[in-house]
């Protein structure tokens, strides 16, 4: 699924002018990305939906400040990530809860490795909230390091540190779980 | 190995679909006022003109009430703007302060290290308490 | 209309406290015990190739300390050190020429450290490298409540004045902390539009 197909800025202009249909179209274009950030940060579908709804309600109030579609994407990722980190600090959503079953979707492009996909997604939950947010922005949202830094108010070098440490930790856990290099590749 | 892991992460962390009916639930929660009202444009308060049998007798209280409401709203709006600006300034000030703090502590640590190295060096030129007269 | 204007002005005056309340600012802080009077050194800034000029009073220091991110291992180390501090003042200048700085200004700072409470802990004089390092601590009871360092080399000088409870070992260990360059940039994925 593409997180946000390119959309005309006119849609944004219409939404800003009070056109709720245009706003709904913007929501549909970005809801998957925002919901996924919430889901992988908070590990619960209900909490992720609450978070995503909260993010879009905030967006509705701040539409006047959004300058372009690109800015909109950045704004949504920024608010969703920081809100999730904030919720994790304040609310009893723990990082050790099991993932909802329906979150662990097998990849249609990579049907041969659902076990590793699930394990990786599970291991992500053992990272600290900021590290998890960095990894999600990097590998889920495919953002570059500078943008991740700007999104999370982090120096780029800190972003790099998080990525390197997280990859090392994930690799170690994968090896520990014998999920790396234990299956013959075709 | 890292490349493989990164590719695997990209596959494992593909965005998922939002739940069915997400947009509809959101749209039903939107405030009644259109988004256009949430712009930073000045708020215009229009109060209905009351029909009075003797308008001149009640002009002052009505005008006073209308002005009071308008001024209180204006005051609250200005206070909100000032408070928001103050919070943003504090945020910027805090970030700048933490950068300066790290820089200052780093310089301090380096200079302390210089002193430690000199003191612990076998051919040190001087050591604490051994100097003839620190001026 | 005149009545309306008068009423409006009156009501606006009523709302003034709400506005002024949002504008309250802290007053200038009083000097801290152990805080040195540091020269301005403004004239040196143009001549220097590198300048570090940090003045963090108690308010700014606690603000800066609060903004350090404990989730970041590097910043967490800095946070540990800064917790007991009340002020930190650093002047560091590097020049392209030898002795381009006024020694008299540095001596004026050194004289303040001859005052009560301050003890010289380290005094390094290297004639060969022309390096001088003086470390002073302000002892209050059994605890170090202040630290001052005056370090000079032909092309640079540094004055550090730290006020508050100080763990010298912890402070010294910070030299090992910095932001590592992990060279992940080359693996950057293309940015989505």
Image (cartoon, rainbow, N blue to C red):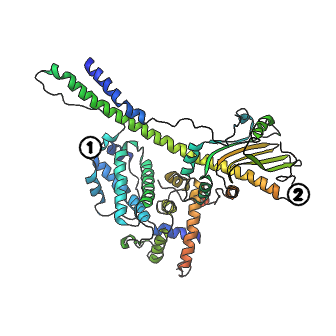
| Of the pair A175 and C29, the residue shown nearer to us | C29
Give the residue pinned by disc 2: B123
Question: Picture coordinates of residue A65 (x, y %)?
Answer: 40, 42
Q: Which quadrant would the C terminus of chain B be assigned to in this image?
A: top right
Question: Picture coordinates of residue C130 (x, y %)?
Answer: 86, 46
- Residue lying furthest left: B53
Name the disc covering residue B33, or none: 1
Q: Is mark 1 on a helix, strand or loop?
A: loop
Label 1 marks a residue whose chain is B
| Of the pair A2 and C146, the residue shown nearer to us | C146
Query: On the same chain: label 2 and label 1?
Result: yes
Q: Do the residues labelled 2 and 1 touch (CB within 8 Å)?
A: no
Distance between mark 2 and mark 1 Cα atoms: 79 Å
State which mark lies toward you, 2 or 1.
2
Q: Can residue A52 be seen in this view?
A: yes
Q: Can residue B41 be seen in this view?
A: no
Question: Picture coordinates of residue A169 (x, y %)?
Answer: 56, 70
Label 2 marks a residue whose chain is B
Crowding near the residue tagged with mark 1, few <14, some 14–19, many ≥20 C-alpha atoms within 10 Å: few
Question: Picture coordinates of residue B93 (x, y %)?
Answer: 54, 42
Q: Is mark 2 on a helix, strand or loop?
A: loop
């Amino acid at each position: 699924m593409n997180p946000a197909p390119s959309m005309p800025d006119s849609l944004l202009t219409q939404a800003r002018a009070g056109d709720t249909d245009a706003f709904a179209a913007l929501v549909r274009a970005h809801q998957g990305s925002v919901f996924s950030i919430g889901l992988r940060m908070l590990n619960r579908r209900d909490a992720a939906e609450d978070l995503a709804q909260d993010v879009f309600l905030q967006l509705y109030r701040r539409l006047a400040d959004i300058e372009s579609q690109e800015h909109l994407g950045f704004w949504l990722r920024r608010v969703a990530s920081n809100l999730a980190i904030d919720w994790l600090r304040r609310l009893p959503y723990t990082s050790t809860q099991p993932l909802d079953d329906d979150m662990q979707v097998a990849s249609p492009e990579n049907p041969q490795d659902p076990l590793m996909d699930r394990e990786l997604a599970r291991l992500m939950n053992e990272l600290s909230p900021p590290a998890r947010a960095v990894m999600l922005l990097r590998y889920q949202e495919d953002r570059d390091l500078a943008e991740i830094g700007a999104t999370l108010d982090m120096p780029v070098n800190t972003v790099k540190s998080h990525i390197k440490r997280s990859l090392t930790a994930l690799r170690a856990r994968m090896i520990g779980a014998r999920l790396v290099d234990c299956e013959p590749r075709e | 190995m890292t490349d493989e892991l990164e590719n695997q992460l990209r596959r494992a962390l593909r965005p998922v679909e939002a739940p069915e009916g997400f947009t509809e639930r959101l749209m039903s929660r939107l405030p009644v006022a259109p988004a256009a009202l949430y712009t930073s444009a000045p708020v215009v308060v229009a109060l209905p003109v009351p029909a009075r049998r003797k308008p001149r007798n009640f002009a002052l209280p009505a005008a006073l009430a209308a002005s009071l409401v308008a001024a209180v709203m204006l005051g609250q709006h200005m206070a909100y703007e000032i408070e928001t600006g103050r919070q943003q300034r504090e945020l910027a000030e805090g970030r700048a302060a933490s950068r300066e703090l790290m820089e200052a502590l780093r310089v301090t640590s380096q200079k302390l290290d210089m002193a430690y190295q000199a003191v612990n060096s076998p051919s040190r030129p001087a050591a604490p308490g051994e100097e003839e007269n620190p001026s | 209309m005149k009545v309306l204007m008068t009423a409006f002005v009156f009501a606006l005056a009523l709302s003034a406290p709400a506005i002024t309340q949002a504008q309250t600012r802290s007053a200038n802080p009083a000097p801290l015990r152990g805080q040195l009077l540091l020269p301005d050194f403004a004239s040196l800034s143009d001549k220097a190739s590198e300048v570090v000029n940090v003045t963090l009073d108690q308010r700014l220091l606690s603000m800066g300390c609060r903004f350090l991110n404990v989730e970041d291992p590097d910043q967490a180390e800095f946070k540990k050190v800064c917790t007991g501090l009340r002020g930190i003042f650093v002047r560091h200048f590097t020049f392209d020429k030898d002795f381009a700085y006024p020694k008299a200004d540095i001596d004026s700072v050194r004289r303040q450290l001859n005052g009560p409470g301050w003890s010289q802990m380290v005094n390094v004089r290297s004639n060969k490298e022309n390096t001088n390092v003086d470390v002073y601590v302000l002892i209050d009871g059994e605890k170090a409540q202040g630290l001052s360092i005056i370090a000079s080399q032909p092309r640079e000088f540094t004055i550090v004045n730290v006020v508050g409870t100080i763990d010298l070992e912890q402070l010294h260990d910070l030299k090992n902390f910095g932001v590592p360059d992990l060279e992940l940039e080359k693996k950057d994925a293309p940015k989505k539009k």
